[in-house]
Image (tube, grey):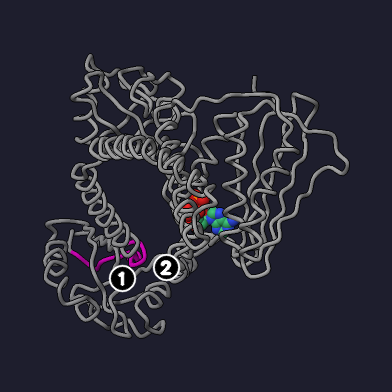
C-alpha cells in the first residue's frame, strides 16, 4: 500500500523529470519549485531557479503583458492563461517559450500558487521566421518575374504536358490574331496561316512549333511566316525548352516567339540585290573573258603584254567564280537549285578534281593525295556532275587555303551499305590549321568566316561551305566536319548512290 508520502514523492519525481519545463510559482512571482527541463532551458543549475522571480527571468519587453495576466489569475478573474513570451537565458540570449499557467486555489477559493508549463519554441519560431523570409523572397521573385514576363517584347507561352496552353504573356496574345484570325482553342498544333520560311508552303501539324515542343523537342531560331496577307504578314523566330520537375518529370514546355519580320524582309532584299547584281555582271564578264582568251592566243603580242593579259585573265576567272557562288546562293534561296543527275563514276571525278587542284596546292606547298579503293572498280552514283565537282573543289581549295606549312590533304572515297541502295562517303581530310571549337558549328553558315581567315587576310567570301551544304542537301545527303585546332579538319560528305 502506498502512503500519502509515497504519492507526494511520486509527484515530486514526476515534476522533476518531466520533459516539459515546469514550475510552481508563488503569489509574488517567485519560483517555489522548478524542474530540470526548465533549469536546462534557461541555463541554470537545478536549484538556482528557486527563489528567483519570474519577473527577473522574463524578457523586459514581455513583462508587462505577463504581469497583467498573472495578476488577473491571482485575483481569481481567470483560472488559466497561455501566452507566447520571451525568457532571458542565464547567458543573456533570448529563449522563446509557450507558457501555460494554472492557478491553484484553496478550499475557500483563495489562490495558493501557480503551476507553469513552459515549452521552448525558439527553434520552431526560427524555422517559422525562415519560412516567412523564404516566402517573402519567393513573392518578390514571383512579382519580378511576372513583371518581366509581361514587359518583354517577346511572346512567351507555357504549354502543359497534355498540350493545353497554360499561360501566355501580352505580347504572345497580341500576335495570335495573324496566324489564327478565327481564334485559337488553346491546344498545341492547331493549324492556321503559318508558313515555312519560303513564305509559300503551309505548315502541317507536325511542324508547328507548339506541337514539336509538346512532343518533347527543344530548338532555337525556328523561323516561319504567319498571316496570309503578304502586306501584313509577320515572321517569327521561335525557341522551345522543356520544363522539368525536381525528379526530371516533364511539367510542360516554354516557347519564346521573337518577331523578325524586318530582318527577314531585309535579308530577302539583300539576296535579291546580290542575285540581280551577279546576274548583270556576268554577261559583260563573259564577253571580257572571251576577248581575253582570243588576245592571250595572239602570238604577235610581245611576251610582256601577254604576261599582263594573263594576270587580267586570272583575275577575271576569279571574278566569274565569285559571281557564280553568289548566283548559286540566290538559286538555293528561291528553292530553284535544279540538279542534272546522271549516272557518274565518282572515282574519276575525284581524280579530275585532285589534278585540277594540284597547281594551287603545289604553289602553296601542300601535298594532295587520294585514298581510293585499291584497283577499285568505278564507284557510281546518280548525281549532278558539275555540282558534286563544285563540292569537291570547294573542300579541296579550303584544305589548301587553310593549310599549315608542310601539311597535306587526303581525298578518300568509299562505298557504305549495299549496292545502289547504299551510300558513298567522300572525305577531304587535311593536316592544316584546324577550326576553333567555338567556330566549328558555324562554318556551314552563309558568309561565316573564321577569325584566323579574317585576321590573316586569307581570301574568301564565307560562301564555299554554304554552297557545299546546299548541294549535298539537294542530293539528299549530309556533310559533317570534325576538326582540332592545330591538327587539321576532316569534311565528310555522305551521298545516297541513287536518291531516285
Ligand atoms: P571561306 O573559305 O571563303 O572563308 P567557307 O564557307 O569555305 O568560306 O569556309 C568558312 C570558314 O570555315 C572559313 O573562313 C574558315 O574559317 C573555316 N574553314 C573552312 N574549311 C577549313 C579547313 N579545311 N581548315 C580550317 N578552317 C576551315
- Residues rendered magenta in the picture: 111-124
Where residue 455 sits in the image (x, y, percent)? Answer: 43, 67
Give the secondary structure at mark 1. Answer: strand
Magenta stretch holds residue 290? no
Query: Circle 1: is it few (<14), some (14-19), or many (20+) Cα within 10 Å?
Result: many
Instruction: Residue 262: tell me if it is visible.
Output: yes
Residue carrying label 2: 15
Which is more toward the observer, 236 or 328?
328
Where residue 76 sits in the image (x, y, percent)? Answer: 14, 59
Residue 379 appears in which quarter of the rendering? Answer: top right
Locate the C terminus by quadrant.
top right
As drawn, 277 above or below 22: above
Residue at (85%, 34%) from the top-left corner? 377
- Give left or right: position of 228 versus 402: left
Residue carrying label 1: 24
Residue 22 appears in which quarter of the rendering? Answer: bottom left
Which is more toward the observer, 482 or 121?
482
Where residue 173 sits in the image (x, y, percent)? Answer: 22, 29
- Give left or right: position of 477 versus 168: right
- Give left or right: position of 470 versus 285: right
Which is more toward the observer, 204 or 404?
404
Mark 1–mark 2 CB contact (< 8 Å): yes
Q: Main secondary structure of the magenta part?
A: strand
Furthest residue toward right: 375
Ligand 1 neighbours mark 1 (CB distance < 8 Å): no
Give the secondary structure at mark 2. Answer: helix
Locate the N terminus by quadrant.
bottom right
Magenta stretch holds residue 119? yes
Amino acid at each position: 500500500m502506498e502512503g500519502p508520502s509515497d504519492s507526494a514523492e511520486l509527484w515530486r519525481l514526476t515534476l522533476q523529470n518531466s520533459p516539459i519545463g515546469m514550475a510552481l510559482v508563488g503569489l509574488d512571482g517567485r519560483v517555489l519549485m522548478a524542474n530540470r527541463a526548465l533549469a536546462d532551458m534557461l541555463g541554470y543549475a537545478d536549484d538556482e531557479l528557486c527563489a528567483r522571480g519570474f519577473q527577473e527571468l522574463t524578457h523586459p519587453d514581455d513583462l508587462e503583458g505577463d504581469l497583467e495576466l498573472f495578476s488577473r489569475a491571482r485575483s481569481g478573474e481567470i483560472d488559466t492563461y497561455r501566452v507566447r513570451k520571451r525568457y532571458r537565458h542565464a547567458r543573456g540570449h533570448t529563449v522563446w517559450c509557450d507558457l501555460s499557467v494554472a492557478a491553484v486555489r484553496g478550499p475557500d477559493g483563495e489562490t495558493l500558487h501557480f503551476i507553469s508549463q513552459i515549452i521552448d519554441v525558439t527553434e520552431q519560431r526560427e524555422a517559422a521566421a525562415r519560412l516567412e523570409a523564404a516566402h517573402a523572397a519567393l513573392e518578390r521573385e514571383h512579382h519580378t518575374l511576372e513583371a518581366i514576363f509581361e514587359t518583354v517584347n517577346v511572346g512567351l507561352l507555357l504549354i502543359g504536358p497534355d498540350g493545353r496552353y497554360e499561360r501566355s504573356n501580352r505580347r504572345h496574345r497580341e500576335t495570335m490574331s495573324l496566324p489564327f484570325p478565327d481564334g485559337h482553342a488553346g491546344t498545341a498544333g492547331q493549324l492556321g496561316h503559318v508558313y515555312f520560311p519560303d513564305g509559300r508552303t503551309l505548315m502541317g501539324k507536325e511542324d508547328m512549333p507548339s506541337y514539336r515542343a509538346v512532343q518533347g523537342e527543344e530548338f532555337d531560331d525556328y523561323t516561319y511566316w504567319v498571316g496570309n496577307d503578304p502586306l501584313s504578314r509577320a515572321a517569327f523566330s521561335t525557341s522551345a525548352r522543356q520544363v522539368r520537375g525536381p525528379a526530371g518529370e516533364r511539367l510542360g514546355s516554354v516557347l519564346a516567339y521573337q518577331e523578325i519580320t524586318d530582318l527577314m524582309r531585309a535579308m530577302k532584299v539583300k539576296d535579291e540585290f546580290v542575285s540581280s547584281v551577279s546576274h548583270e555582271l556576268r554577261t559583260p564578264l563573259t564577253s571580257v573573258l572571251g576577248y581575253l582568251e582570243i588576245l592571250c592566243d595572239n602570238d604577235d603580242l610581245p611576251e610582256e603584254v601577254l604576261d599582263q593579259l594573263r594576270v587580267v585573265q586570272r583575275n577575271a576567272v576569279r571574278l566569274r567564280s565569285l559571281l557564280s557562288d553568289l548566283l548559286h546562293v540566290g538559286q538555293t534561296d528561291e528553292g530553284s537549285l535544279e540538279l542534272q543527275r546522271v549516272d557518274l563514276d565518282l572515282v574519276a571525278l575525284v581524280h579530275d578534281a585532285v589534278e585540277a587542284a594540284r597547281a594551287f596546292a603545289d604553289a602553296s606547298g601542300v601535298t594532295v593525295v587520294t585514298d581510293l579503293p585499291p584497283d577499285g572498280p568505278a564507284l557510281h552514283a546518280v548525281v549532278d556532275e558539275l555540282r558534286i565537282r563544285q563540292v569537291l573543289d570547294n573542300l579541296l581549295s579550303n584544305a589548301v587555303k587553310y593549310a599549315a606549312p608542310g601539311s597535306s590533304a587526303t581525298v578518300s572515297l568509299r562505298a557504305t551499305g549495299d549496292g545502289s541502295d547504299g551510300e558513298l562517303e567522300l572525305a577531304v581530310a587535311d593536316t592544316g590549321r584546324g577550326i576553333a571549337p567555338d567556330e566549328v558549328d558555324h562554318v556551314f553558315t552563309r558568309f561565316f568566316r573564321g577569325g584566323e581567315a579574317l585576321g590573316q587576310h586569307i581570301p574568301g567570301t564565307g560562301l564555299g561551305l554554304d554552297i557545299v551544304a546546299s548541294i549535298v542537301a539537294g542530293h539528299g545527303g549530309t556533310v559533317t566536319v570534325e576538326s582540332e585546332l592545330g591538327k587539321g579538319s576532316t569534311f565528310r560528305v555522305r551521298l545516297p548512290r541513287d536518291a531516285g
